[in-house]
Structures are given as C-alpha cells and as structure tokens.
Amino acid sequence: MGPLTRLAHNENPLGASPKAIEAIRRAAVSASMYPDPSGYELKSAIGERFGVGLDNVILGNGSADLIQLLGLALISSDEDEVLVSDPCYPRYRVTARVGRCRLVQVPLNANMKHDLPALMNAVSERTRIVFLDVPHSPTGTIVSAESVRALVARLPPRAAFVLDEAYREFAAGDSLLPDSVELFREFGSVVGLRTFSKAYGLAGVRLGYGFCPAWVARAIEEVREPFNVNAIAQAAGIAALGDQEHVERTVALTHRNMARLIEGLNAIGLNTTSSKANFVLTNLKRPAAPVAQELRARGIATRTVEGSRLQEYLRISVGTEQQVEAVVSELDDILRFCN
Ligand SMILES: *Cc1c(COP(=O)(O)O)cnc(C)c1O
C-alpha cells in the first residue's frame, strides 16, 4: 500500500508556499537563538496586510494555542460559561474543561448552521466567551455577517466574542461572510482568530494569529509563554503572507476539487452539507465510524464527528484530484459490499 491519503485534517494538498519553505531553510541557520518574544516583524507584516495596529495583533502556536490562551486569560470562576454550538471544534470544549467552568452547547439548526437566535437565548450574565467558527467545522456552513453582528450587539459587556476564521480564505469570495477585522473595530469585545495551517499550508509549523481589542491582547500577554511562537514559524509566516499567489492557487484548486468530490459523492447516492471550507460533511445514513475504519484500512484517513449527534456523518478534506477519485471509489465499494 502507498502512503496514507490524508483527508482527515483539512491540510493543503499543494503543501506550503515555496517561499515559506525557503524562509524556513534560512531560519534554521539561527536555530540556536531564542525567537523574538514579541514577534515584532510578523506582527508588523500582519498589521500592515490587514490594516490593524500592532497592539491589536496576537500570535499563537497555532490558533489552537490562542483558543486556550483566551480561556486562561478570560475565565476566572467556575460559574463562568463558555458558549458554543454542538457539534463544535474540540478545542473549545477543552478550553472550558481546563478553565473548570461550564460549557453551554446549542445544537445547529436544521440547515446545519449555527443557530444564532438559540445561541442568543443561551447567553447569560455568566457568559465569558462565545466561540463561533465561520465557516463551521465539521459542516463547512457559514452564517451571515449581519446575523453575527446582531448577536454580538446584544452580548453583555463581559462576554468576549471569538470569531474563528480558520477556513476564511476558502470562503472569502462570499459577500455574506463575516470579517473579524471589521467586527473588532465596531465592538470592544470581538476577537478574530486566523491560522497559517489551512490555506497557507503550514500546519506542521504551528502558527496562528488574531485580531482583538488591546485589553484582550494584554490579558493574553500575562498568561502566554514568552516564546510560544518559534523563530521558524515567525519566518515562515512572514514569507507565506508575502505569497498570496500560493493562497489563490490553493483556493482555486480546492474549489475545483470540491466540485469533483461533491459530484462523485452524489453519484454514489450521498449528500453533503453546503460547505464553504476545504472539506465536506457527508451523510452516510449508517454509523460512520466503521466506514471510516475500513477506509483507513484501505489507506485513506477521514474524520468522524465524535461526541455529537452526527454519528452517521463523515468529514472528508478536499485533496488532489487523485485523492478525490480514490476516496469516492473506496467509499462506493465499502458502502456496496460491507455492512
Ligand atoms: C484547523 C482549525 C483551527 C486551527 O488550528 P491550528 O492548526 O491550531 O491553527 C482552528 N479552528 C478550527 C475550527 C479549525 O478547524
């Protein structure tokens, strides 16, 4: 059997930008030195690109690190609440657990989207953090900027609103898509989280960033490890930001192969949610775990949705054309002949 076909983590099938790889090589020469703890150059590059001041940029060892740092910085009592959708990105749950506070989960609506009115109803005086990923994982669905703004406008002042934009680049062409840079300017409690792991193809380097009001940046500063973003990641991030062509190539390839993947799944009788990210969620109409296990035995890694009601759903990353063909054909075979 050949190498594992990796369709479980929404990685970039084109790999990292050649410019980022070159920057990593150059940075390796200085590996004996501690990184810049302030991440000044990288923050400047991010600030410049998105028109945000340095005091409003945060950096993390992946955006997963920033999710946890937000919990450490903002949760102070076991009566505090973290509000998320169900299902949600697993780090949000861990953040509430590590903070020893309450996790409040609100099911997605019938269209598999964040249920913003129900989330609003679940907000209380104890809500400290609302995590909302748009596009949402594992469904890939989005909610409109307008509906997000309506929720944020009604949050109590002590509740931070975190817009996780891990898949933003794939959906950026959609005029409905919320934008954390706009939101954090308008409201004093909005945090935007972005990552170099998906469209930029640097998942292995671990680099996330975000935008937030200065008070949140200061609160994170008090709890983070000073060298949480290593020197190689800082160099890679600067180079990757400077290679938007690579992001554009990635997004174009993803859209093309997403269409192929959906068409292939439809042809074998499977529906998908309307994903704006770089993966699809498909309803197998039977328990997904054994199917994922069989796919894995055949050399293809995909993702089930643990700990949720979506036990019959499988998440498949959009890979190369060849990978798309392989996963559809193996799925077809498994669904036909195995039970
Ligand atoms: C992948 C992902 C992240 C980012 O992961 P990092 O690699 O830690 O930057 C954040 N949120 C969601 C919803 C994701 O799917």
Image (cartoon, grey):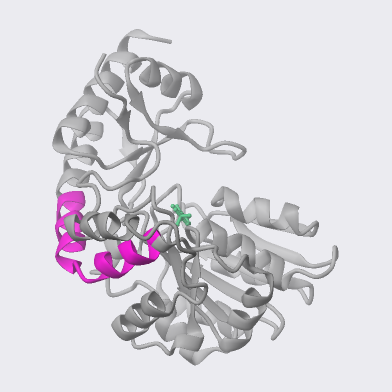
Observer able to see residue 97 = yes
The answer to whether 89 appears left or right of 127 in the picture is left
Residue under the image location 32 percent in, 60 percent down: 27
Residue under the image location 33 percent in, 36 percent down: 7
The answer to whether 284 appears left or right of 115 in the picture is left
83 in relation to 220, above or below: above
Residue 243 part of the magenta-drawn span: yes
Observer able to see residue 87 = no
Residue 234 part of the magenta-drawn span: yes
Residue under the image location 39 percent in, 21 percent down: 296
Residue under the image location 71 percent in, 57 percent down: 96
The x, y position of residue 73, in whole percent, is 69, 71
Q: Which residues are magenta?
A: 232-255
The x, y position of residue 139, in whole percent, is 42, 49
Instruction: Name the quadrant containing residue 2.
Output: top left
Q: Quadrant of the N terminus?
A: top left
Q: Quadrant of the C terminus?
A: top left
326 in relation to 275, above or below: above
Task: Name the one closer to the observer, 125 or 4.
Answer: 4
204 in relation to 269, above or below: below
The x, y position of residue 282, in whole percent, is 37, 37
The x, y position of residue 326, in whole percent, is 21, 25
Count the numbered circles shown: 0
Instruction: Name the quadrant containing residue 279.
Output: top left
Task: Name the one closer to the observer, 127 or 32.
Answer: 32
Does the magenta stretch mainly form a helix, a strand or a loop? helix
